Amino acid sequence: MLKLEPRAQPSALMSYASPPIALAATVVLASLLFAALGKDPVRGLAIFFIEPLNGWRGVSEVLLKATPLILCALGLAVCYRSNVWNIGAEGQFVLGAIAGGGVALWLTTQGVTGARGIYSPLVLLGGVLGGMAWAAITAWLRDSFNASEILVSLMLVYVAQQLLNYLVFGPWKDPMGFNFPQTRTFDTSTWLPQLYGRLHWGFVLALVLVAGFWAFLFRSWRGFQLQVGGLAPAAARYAGFSARASLWTALMVSGGMAGLAGAMEAAGPLRQLTPHLSTGYGFTAIIVCFVGRLHPVGIVFSGLLLSMMLIGGELGQSRLGLPNALTGVFQGLLLFLLLASDTLIQYRLRWKAGAPAGAKSAARLAKEAS
């Protein structure tokens, strides 16, 4: 019988090598899946991992999609390192888009105009506050009633989506939009300034925040407190670190980053609110977070990788007729294989010979009866 035994000294090298190993295994399984679907595996892999980087326009689209993934994953890394399991970044993303988009829509309806991007900081600030407010619900319920932050944050995702649907189908619906569920296009003064094509300055801000989060997590006293609370709660209590403060700090930071990403999506490439504002960025960011080893720099590379997979999935639908769900399958495979690799880093498989449990129980009963 196979059993897992803890390793005396887990390999530090393998902890860094496991993401590339998991990616390589995902590529192998993806090739088999392409073959099972009757598609050329080489062509399929090229569409997912090479075609998205075809030319500067393709690179800019990869960076554009990577921006919200990086921002959401940075906040989630703070949560997970603090042992706070926020699964609702998607809902906080949507609320950030609603709040930031609401600011942009109000400025537009009031006839406020100006140079392009002059009011975009207000839109981004609204997004941060919206995401933090939505995360505060989870923090309050956990703090006051010991409710599971996993369930609460996840359920709030669907509440946020329904709120967005209500607004774009109802009071915020564009009266001149031919009955489509969308708001008016925001005024250019609220748009994010562009770098190249649809890529905006939000990507540069994301890289700046990566450096800021690295300093916060690894060079600040508050970041040290959060990580000690996540790794050794008993030691954190003995040292006098407040678990309540850690809970609120982690969720506020995570909610603010997801809300910032939502506001960037609304004021960046979309420039209005629609029911399909998010394509699951908040959920994909969980995978980005773990593939990046909960490290800000690693999150940048994993965000680019998952962005390529998202664009590759779109290209695969149009060029090879692949199902839309295939991208989610690849993401799930990558996460599953990464977790399997991490398990084998911490444990080794051992074959233990012995009688089945049922036979041992029968033998014990027979001995006691005699």
Image (cartoon, rainbow, N blue to C red):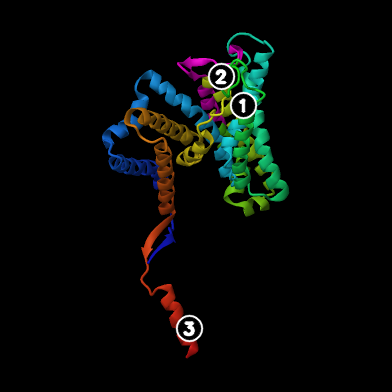
Question: Residue tagged by mark 3?
Answer: 365
Snapshot quadrant of residue 213? top right
Q: CA distance from mark 3 to mark 1?
A: 68 Å
Q: Compared to 14, does 76 lie above or below?
A: above
Q: Tag on residue 271?
A: 2
The residue lying at 54 percent from left, 15 percent from top is 193
Mark 2 to mark 1 CA distance (whole Å)? 17 Å
Q: How far apart are labels 2 and 3 at the CA level?
A: 73 Å
Picture coordinates of residue 4 (x, y %)?
Answer: 42, 61
First-in-chain label (2 vs 3): 2
Q: Are marks 3 and 1 in contact (CB under 8 Å)?
A: no
**To which residue does mark 1 refer?**
169
Is residue 54 found left or right of 256 in the rendered image? Answer: left
Q: Is residue 15 magenta?
A: no
Q: Which residue of the protein is positioned furthest toward the bottom in this rendering?
A: 370
Q: Estimate the x, y position of residue 331 in percent, counting from the top left.
A: 43, 40
Given residues 211 and 20, the one toward you in this image is: 20
Left or right: residue 303 compared with residue 53 = right
